[in-house]
Amino acid sequence: MAEERIVEMETVQLGIIGMGDMGKLYARTFSAAGWKHVNVCDMPSKYEQLREEFEGTGVTVMKDGHSVSRQSDWILYSVPAEFIDSVVATYGPSTKIGAIVAGQTSVKEPEIAAFETHLPDDVFIITCHSMHGPAVSPKGQPLVIINHRGTAEALGLVERILSCFESEIAHLSYKEHDRITADTQAVTHMAFLSMGTTWKHQDSFPWFDSTYTGGIENVKVNMTMRILSNKWHVYAGLAILNPSAKAQVRQYSLSVAALFKLMIQEKEEEFVSRIRAAGEFVFGNRGNREQILLSDNLLDQYSLGSVPKDKRKPNSHLSLLAMVDCWYQLKMNPYSHMVCQTPLFRFWLGISEYLFLNEDYLQDAMQAALYCKEIREDDMEFMMSARGWQECIALGNMEGYRVRFEDTAQFFQNRFGEAAVIGKQMIEMITRKTTAAPGSSVAPVSEQAANHA
């Protein structure tokens, strides 16, 4: 078996079309693992630059996707979801007979449609999705494999190829993948982006505001900065091109608005009843599951600001209350989505869990939501920001998404460097906790049961 594996790594040719950050991560990982033939390409204008970057690495830079497709036995399209159809239409017909084709887009329905439309009938379609960004170690992270059109032998080869990432493999269908990523990624990103847009409209840096002091707030701030420091098209594709995302994003916006209306009318009984029902639905049947996050004291160390914790002002945590209400209204159990968790989703579910399972925190949040007038303008801006993002996604407006994203990111760009360091530390912390927790591995599932941060 070991000899067969060596022969396989010396003879099977791997191809990557699209050398963005994830394409480069895959190429370097394959080469370092011992695969002797790793063929890659990007746009022809980047050919010389890529040749210099990968000189001496064992990675062969080719001029275009035709060259990669003709020679490679396994081919990965690592391009933005909005361009997948045009790129596959260009290079798909050149695919080697009997090759296995995959994509690294985070929305699989348009990817599968492109493959079915433009690939020859004599190739296999076994696609994949690493549920993390290029700056996160793939070890222990979920990696989805979708066998859409492939034999058991072809699937076995794919598993051996991807085994060098040391990720937790989940076998899903593409429809289930998209349904779950709509929640674990699209809605999570929208919530963080809505907070960022709120702070921009308020002309306020949250690390200087005593309303945003403490462990939960550090997660909100640092993960928002992490998203805004990345490329807009990753998040736009997830939200706009995923057919399952629009309904979930719409419900989150509706939940924010419904709760805010109860808050400003101070309808305490109705507001508390709704929050309690949502909390019971999401967190009432956790069983013996270990809590996701660590102590508040640990989270306190990841602060961008210097406001003392004892100066903390009340916070309604409307963003978290609305997310739990959203899950409740959709009758969606977020714990069932851990098969496709991303670090960002784990943090988002973790701080929601942390709030709802701490009765003092939850009581404080509900009382602040109903009666603390000094934070009401922040909550109003958050409701407006959430609705703005939802409408942009509903219209399928890529350009509008880009403008909103970049305009918000511009406001915070001077802190991205520091936030990147702290965010990386937080991701490493939550990743260590994930892989160390008993029973935390991602188990394969038969049907699609949902990164990229």
Image (cartoon, grey):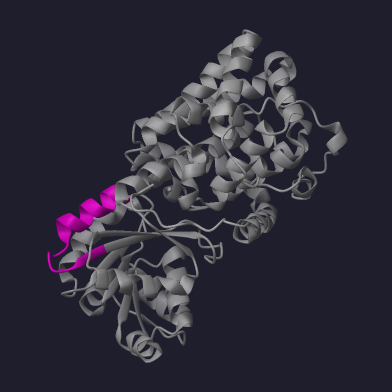
Name the residue located 43 percent from the left edge and 70 percent from the top edge: 26
Query: Which x, y percent locates residue 116?
Result: 17, 56
Name the residue located 52 percent from the left edge and 17 percent from the top edge: 258
Write the start and end of the magenta stretch as one range.
108-125
Majority secondary structure in the magenta region: helix
Q: Residue 431 occupies which quadrant of the picture?
A: bottom right
Give whichever of 200, 296 is nearer the camera.
296
Residue 124: in magenta span = yes
Query: Which x, y percent locates residue 118?
Result: 16, 59
Give whichever of 231, 413 is nearer the camera.
231
Number of marks present in the image shown? 0
Q: Is residue 308 above or below residue 378?
A: below
* Rendered-image quadrant of the N terminus: bottom left
Query: Which x, y percent locates residue 145?
Result: 36, 60
Q: Is residue 59 above or below residue 401?
A: below
Give whichever of 404, 31 is nearer the camera.
31
Name the residue located 35 percent from the left edge and 49 percent from the top edge: 448
Residue 112: in magenta span = yes
Name the residue located 72 percent from the left edge and 13 percent from the top edge: 371
Q: Is residue 91 left or right of residue 48?
A: left
Q: Residue 130 occupies which quadrant of the picture?
A: bottom left
Q: Residue furthest left?
A: 121
In the rendered image, is residue 297 in sight? yes
Query: Which x, y percent locates residue 204?
Result: 69, 33
Q: Residue 35 occupies which quadrant of the picture?
A: bottom left
In the rendered image, is residue 392 in sight? no
Give whichever of 123, 193 is nearer the camera.
123
